[in-house]
Amino acid sequence: MKNTVLLGALTVAGLAAGTAGAATLDDVKARGTLNCGVSTGLTGFSAPDANGVWQGFDVAVCRAVAAAVLGDPMAVNFVPTTGQTRFTALASGEIDILARNTTWTFSRDVDLKFEFVGVNYYDGQGFMVPKALGVSSAKELDGATVCIQTGTTTELNLADFFRVNNINYEPVPIETNAEAQQQYLAGACDVYTTDASGLASTRASFEAPTDHVILPEIISKEPLGPLVRHGDSEWGDVVRWSFNALVAAEEYGVTSANIEELSASAGDNPELNRLLGAEGELGAMLGLEPDWAKKAIMANGNYGEIFEKTIGEKTPIGLSRGLNAQWTEGGLLYSPPFR
Amino acid sequence: MTTMTDPPGQGFRLSQLIYDTRYRSLTIQVVAMILLMLLVSWLVANTVTNLHALGKDFDFGFLTQPSGYDINQRLIAYDSQSTHGRAAVVGILNTLLVAVLGCALATVLGVVAGVLRLSNNWLVSRLMAVYVEGFRNVPLLLWIVLIFALMSESTPAPSAFRGDTPSASMLLDGVAVTNRGIYIPAIHFGAPFFDNGLYNWLIVLIAFAASVFAVKRLSRWAAVKQEATGDRPTTWYLTLGILVLPVAILFALMGAFLDLPSLQGFNFQGGIHLRGSLIALWLALSLYTGAFIAEIVRGGILAVSKGQSEAAFALGLRPGTTMKLVVLPQALRVIIPPLISQFLNLTKNSSLAIAVGYMDARSTLGGITINQTGRELEGMLLLGLFYLVLSLVISGAMNVYNTSVKLKER
């Protein structure tokens, strides 16, 4: 009996670790599809639309990588993960990229053995309360019941925030955003806390979004970004530079509208020429086609276009660029040069 | 004499290992053992290689690191600065709590439903059949989620108790049923020297156990007297006194008072908070397992020969007494062994707690801790070990009980 349990555990561990460490780029090319870990449904970031096609800000990263590697932005197999299952899914090789509004932290990067390839959304943790509660600051939340998604950094930030401010709270751990929304709307918790972008997205899906306020306090830094397994730098490079291509495209004014025209002939901007494959051999260095970046950008447009389409001010979620503007416009987005 | 076979000096041939029945079983065992060891060594080597490929080691040091997360239901002192090890213990205690509560309620439900299902009353027996078939044929997870959803959607929020004309009110001024759980009064001790709640309850428990022992002695004395004289002395007031008085005196000495829950700020404060997650998990586990136990009890009772109850009736015993004194004691020996596995099932099923956010061992050690530290292998091994030990302890204890009730063959 004792042996059986041990064997079972070892089998699971052995099988789970079976595929880790292989050359992911070759695997993806051989498979013909990209396995991409996303959330179980967060409007604007990653959620299936009415036709069952995944759409969103995080989904766009997966599509860009699939376009760069396989030439087809739709060749993505989306794997919904919860806060608790996402890291195991990535470590075990079930997914090639995790693009699930995941915060870049020291321990995840170093101790959990993952590699964050960049930041696609600079965020911070906020609190949402019903307007009827009459709360205007998070410090007035003494004794409140707080819904949190378990297995996230928000869980840790929350504990720190309430301890530092010496106030009490009752945590209600929840598995997914949908369940949290249901508990919050049923009044089973007074407060829902997660990344401010997630709160905006959740509020946008309410029947009466104006009945709820997001408190002014942002209690943490949450740089959200796509990540891959540690130890496969080639694959990490592919994902990192596919994402950087989207950011650089916005900086240089390459949009899905003018990209055909710009890439038709080599222009007078050498960096743009290198990005679009008219000059140099950047694609070959990554082990990809020369027009990899062009395909990545054509998948959903540049970073700015993706932002506006999925979570921008014209969408129900209504997030402003803020920190996520280009560095030339006072934001933090800054792609290293394509050289 | 010429037919003597088995000429000596033939020696041992290799084929005998397979074709000679004297050696065959040994051969099979050795081969199986070698295969098993090969499998084990392959698994271990595979694990080691892959851990190495991932750059991970095998280390339980994370248990002494600060956990950083809070747990809502804690039976021992714990905060976000405590270690992952302590968080695991908090989770383990929560698992034990719901397992003990669940086993107790499931047994009561199961015995009642099992006996009633055999009732001659058509309505009662059909109702119990509906209960049994309804609960045991729908997955447990659905019941847990359903009860939790009922709790959180159909009961009032604490804010409904506020104001001059609240839309909800407390039952008997002491019990508040809210969508965050049920708040009930708690007993606290206020006298000096009695500030540690746990020891106080231990003292009360010991006193109560002594009272129960005394009551047993009393009833034995009454039985002896009845044997001798035919008259049973009236003892109910003595029994009541022995049971109630010592505990009451202790409560008075230790300054016990009722701590009623009251609405303060966002939530009720004071009293005992039975969270919705605990109630949902507890009720669902009990109702589900109770349905199985009902069938076990029914089977046990049917296994007792009809002649036994007919003989009891012939002696003039009433149906209730017959069930209590004649049928159930004999049915127990059939009931106990399958009952053990139902208790084990209930305990292990409690790991579905995560569905409603109940912080059991699976949610703390096997959930948040693994997620924050990335120690999947270590955490899962520990979790497996915990459930294994717990199950062995339960089945060990129940086997001891089984030995005490089974037919004594002389």
Image: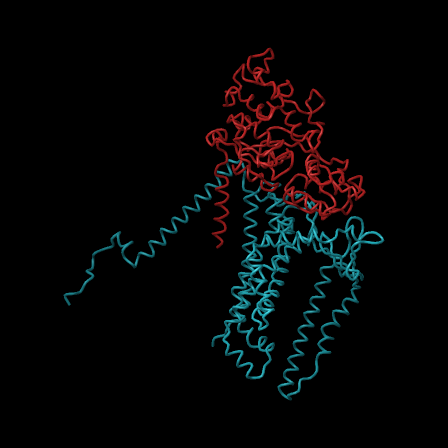
Chain colours: A red, B cyan
Q: Is residue A216 left or right of residue B372?
A: right
User: Residue at 36% of width from left, 52% of height from top?
Assistant: B30
Which image quadrant is residue B75 in? bottom right
Q: Position of residue B46 (x, y in %)?
A: 46, 41
From this view, report whether residue B191 is shown above or below residue A258: below
User: Residue at 63% of width from left, 88% of height from top?
Assistant: B228
From this view, report whether residue B285 is shown above or below residue B316: above
Which image quadrant is residue A88 in? top right
Q: Position of residue A60 (x, y in %)?
A: 60, 29
From this view, report whether residue B180 is shown above or below residue B327: above
| Depth order, front residue of B5/A118 | A118
Furthest toward the left, the residue is B2
Furthest toward the top, the residue is A268
**The C terminus of chain A, quarter of image:** top right
User: Residue at 65% of width from left, 36% of height from top?
Assistant: A43
Q: Position of residue B203 (x, y in %)?
A: 71, 65
Q: Is residue A44 left or right of residue A89?
A: right
Q: Position of residue B324 (x, y in %)?
A: 59, 75
From this view, report whether residue A87 is shown above or below residue B296: above
